Each structure stands twice: as structure tokens, then as C-alpha cells.
Amino acid sequence: MLIRSWDRGDEAEWRAWLAEGRDFGLLAANGRDGEGPVLVPTHFLLDAEAGEILLHLAAPNPLLAAVRADPAVTLAVTDDYAFAPGHWRGEPGTPTSYYASVHFVCTAEVVEDAAGKARILNRQLAHFQPETPDTRVTPGDGPFGRLLPGLRGLRLTVREVRAKFKYDDKKPAHEQYALADRLAARGHGRDAGVRAQLLRRNARRTG
């Protein structure tokens, strides 16, 4: 992902953006020689303070074999995206895409033992299903415990975070406001989210 100086996101920015409820991304691992990468859409749990990401996959998932061969992975989260037509952006009228994207460059560890898998699942349940605090995974006990052999945990140690917020920050403030008006008028897809990001970045830059 190419990141220009004007659309780089700092740590406080990407943390706040993810904390708004963005906990689903695309996990990529290196494929075998001559093959493309292995990609898995997945929910994940970020522990930014510990510098790790937790998730689980079904045992037959091909990404696990890829990780065992090469533990280098990237988790990408992308949202608040929209197409901006060329005639919106003045001369020379080049169209572009607006989006926010955070990439976590990680080293992955497959968690095989039942207790370790249960710990990951219980942390995920507390995050994604807080309305059922009594639901717990215990190895060998209850319906969830008996499902553990069919699952594998993944612990990703974050080595680098690359964050991009591409909303024409290099343009003058009045042009950004005009773009925000166009997004409001069009009003479909993720235009509202894109407009909010564009105005937030503008206020941050000019304020």
C-alpha cells in the first residue's frame, strides 16, 4: 500500500477508527512457491496494548498450512471508501478512490492446545457477545468445549502498522469542502462515512 505524507494515519487516528467497531478484516499469508497468497476474511480481536491480534479458524483452513510454512502475515482492514469521479476534482479531472485502510504486519503463531484455544475463544466471546457473559468455553466440557478439536487459534504479534486515510488532504480546504458537498448530494453506499472522514481530516489539518 502506497502511503503519501498527506494521507498517513498516526497511531491515535487508526486506533480511534478501529475502536468505532471495525473488527473484521482480510488476513493474508504467503502461498506456496508459484501460487498466490492465501486470503481469509475474518473477525479478529485487537489487543493494541499487548501488540497482538487474536482469532480462530477451522482446522482444515488452508491459511493454517501457509502459516506453518511461513509465519509472516498481514491483516488488512478497509472501510469508508467511495469512488470520486474526475469532474468532482477539478483539472485535470482525475478520478480516484477515497478510503481508510489499516494494515497490520505480523508474525503468526498457530495455537494448538485446548487450553490456549479456549482462552482465545473466551476473549472473543467477551468482545463480540458481551450480552451472554456466562457463555464460556471449557476444554472437554459442554457443546463449545467439544468443538475445540475442530478449531485452531491464531495469535498474531504485530511488528508494524501501516495506516492510510486517503481523502484528498493535499487539496486546499475549500476544495475538500466542495467534495464533501458532492458526497452529501450523492448519498449512496459509504458516502456518508467518507464525507465524515474527509471533514475530520480537513479539520485536523486546518485546525
Image (tube, rainbow, N blue to C red):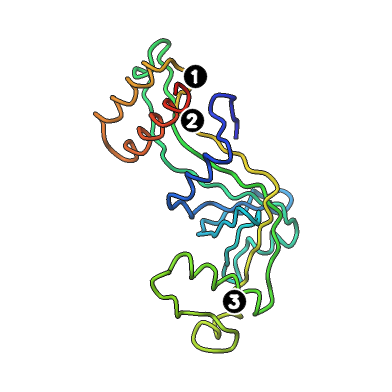
Quadrant into which the N terminus falls: top right
What is the number of the mark on residue 118? 3
Q: Which element type, helix, strand or loop, lies under badge 2? A: strand
Residue 98 spot, x, y in % from top left:
44, 31
Circle 1 residues within 10 Å: few <14, some 14–19, many ≥20: some
Q: Which residue is mark 2?
A: 166
Residue 6 spot, x, y in % from top left:
55, 24
3 or 1: tag closer to the N-terminus:
3
In the orientation shown, which residue stands out farthest toward the front? 207
Circle 2 residues within 10 Å: few <14, some 14–19, many ≥20: many
In the orientation shown, which residue stands out farthest toward the bottom? 141
Measured in 3D between alpha carbons, the distance from the residue under mark 1 to the one under mark 2, in whole angstroms, is: 10 Å
Q: Is residue 135 above or below residue 73?
A: below
Q: Which residue is mark 1?
A: 170
Measured in 3D between alpha carbons, the distance from the residue under mark 3 to the one under mark 1, in whole angstroms, is: 47 Å
Residue 46 spot, x, y in % from top left:
57, 56
Residue type marked 2: Lys
Residue type marked 3: Ala
Circle 3 residues within 10 Å: few <14, some 14–19, many ≥20: many
2 or 3: tag closer to the N-terminus:
3
Measured in 3D between alpha carbons, the distance from the residue under mark 2 to the one under mark 3, in whole angstroms, is: 39 Å
Q: Are marks 3 and 1 in contact (CB under 8 Å)?
A: no
Q: Which element type, helix, strand or loop, lies under badge 1? A: loop
What is the number of the mark on residue 48? none
Q: Is residue 26 above or below residue 3?
A: below
Snapshot quadrant of residue 130: bottom left
Left or right for 189, reference 71: left
Q: Is residue 124 above or below residue 118?
A: above
Quadrant into which the C terminus falls: top left
Left or right for 199, reference 164: left
Tally of numbered tags: 3
